[in-house]
Image (cartoon, grey):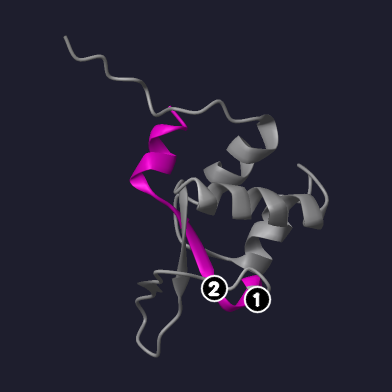
Amino acid sequence: MVIIQSEIMDLDRVEKGVLEKLIFEETFENILQECKDLALPNVITDVLKYLIQHKLVVAKYPTETKKSKPGFMYDSDRMKDYTYQATTKGIRHLS
């Protein structure tokens, strides 16, 4: 018998609130602006890093063309250089 554990994590109000804003690709500045009622900017930044670490959000690097490319890594000291979007795994956590 194979037991499959659920990959759904319990998210708190702020984590879920940030994730809800990332259905579509957003800049770091837009995320801070749209989430200002949830928590302070430094908390939002930490939550975003947490969501990336758990693969619920992907950081994308803007290119000269309109489409951004997901990076295999990002620089957490330069969060403004990227755009962010919820992954399929992240969207599953919203339902």
Q: Quadrant of residue 88?
A: top left
Q: Extreme top residue here?
A: 1
Question: Mark 1: few, some, or many residues within 10 Å (few <14, many ≥20)?
Answer: few
Question: In the image shown, does 2 or 11 lie closer to the viewer?
Answer: 2
Q: Secondary structure at mark 1?
A: loop
* Res. 21 visible in picture: no
Residue wearing tag 1: 78
| Residue type, numbered disc 2 | Tyr
Location of the C terminus (image quadrant)? top left
Relative placement, left or right, of 93 versus 46 is left
Q: Position of residue 82 (x, y in %)?
A: 54, 73
Real-space Cα separation, disc 1 to disc 2, in angstroms: 8 Å
| Residue type, numbered disc 1 | Arg
Q: Quadrant of residue 69?
A: bottom left
Q: Position of residue 15 (x, y in %)?
A: 63, 39
Q: Are marks 1 and 2 in contact (CB under 8 Å)?
A: yes
Give me the residue at 79% from left, 57% from top.
41
Question: In the image shown, does 72 or 20 lie closer to the viewer?
Answer: 72
Residue 90 within the magenta-colored segment of the rendering:
yes
Give me the residue at 76% from left, 42% from top.
38
Residue wearing tag 2: 82
Give me the residue at 63% from left, 70% from top.
79
Q: Extreme front residue here?
A: 1
Query: Relative to 84, is 61 above or below?
Result: below
Query: Relative to 83, is 11 above or below?
Result: above
Range of magenta residues: 79-95
Location of the N terminus (image quadrant)? top left
Q: Secondary structure at mark 2?
A: loop
Q: Position of residue 43 (x, y in %)?
A: 77, 50
Query: Relative to 67, is 41 above or below?
Result: above
